[in-house]
Amino acid sequence: LRAPLSATNYTADTDGYDLRTPLNRIGNMNLFDREEPDGYPETGRLWLNTANLCERMRFAQHLCMAPNSSLKDDDYGSAGDDNVANPVQLLKLKLDPSQWKDAGAVVDLFLGLLYPGEGRANVDLDRQAGIAFLNSDNTGVPNSSPFDQLSDAAYDGRVRGMVAFLMALPRFQEQ
């Protein structure tokens, strides 16, 4: 989710220190702390369990929240405030302005970034779910809040939520 906006500003960033709390909550994969020199296994079944999967989903949601969200502090305290992402800025860098309010184009962009190399058929159900999310209101009623008609604040929240949703899918967590 990170792309340069300028020489010192990016669409996503962390100070590194604020990763400690979420990594500690995930549990068994502390950064640079594997006893064996070969690193952690690549397959999720060896280290993934329900508790750390929930924490990974929580971190994805937290990362995609607006930086001024009070939920960031409620969830992680002051630690974690520097883990930020702005998916709307990223999509405005990557998509033509005519596609900014096209739910399919927005979902396709993030599927391509988050699931590189996956064939369209492999992510079609995820794509459909992402489009449905963008076009639904906060109650989840399908097509109740058309994406192309959202105000700027609602648009920002909907895109952030959809990206967090895609990052929380088991497919993303398990490689």
Image (spheres, grey):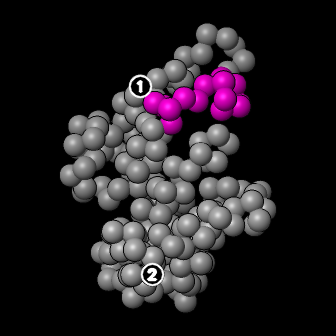
To which quarter of the image does residue 136 belong? bottom left
Q: Which residue is at a point 49% across and 84% down the rendered structure image?
A: 101
The mark nearer the N terminus, 2 or 1, is: 1
How dense is the environment of label 1, judged by Cα within 10 Å: few (below 14), some, or many (20 and up)? some
- Residue 52's place in the image compared with 127, above or below, is above
Q: Nearer the viewer, residue 37 or 62?
A: 62
To which quarter of the image does residue 20 belong? top left
Q: Which residue is at a point 71% across and 31% down the rendered structure image?
A: 43
Q: Amino acid at mark 2?
A: Asn
**Residue 24: numbered disc:** 1
Residue ranking furthest to the top? 35
Q: Nearer the viewer, residue 80 or 123?
A: 123
Q: Magenta residues, as a range?
A: 40-53
In the displayed structure, does residue 71 sit left or right of residue 91? left
Number of numbered discs: 2
For discs 2 and 1, the disc positioned in front in the rendered view: 2
Q: Element at badge 2?
A: loop
Q: CA distance from mark 2 to mark 1?
A: 39 Å
Q: Element at badge 1?
A: helix
To which quarter of the image does residue 83 belong? top left
In the displayed structure, does residue 3 sit left or right of residue 8? right
Let me know if residue 108 appears in the view.
Answer: yes
**Residue 112: numbered disc:** none
Q: Which residue is at a point 33% across and 40% down the rendered structure image?
A: 80
Q: Amino acid at mark 1?
A: Asn
The residue that disc 2 covers is: 143
Residue 173 % position (x, y):
59, 42
Residue ranking furthest to the front? 141
Q: Nearer the viewer, residue 65 or 51?
A: 51
- Residue 144's place in the image compared with 75, above or below, is below
| Quadrant holding the C terminus | top right
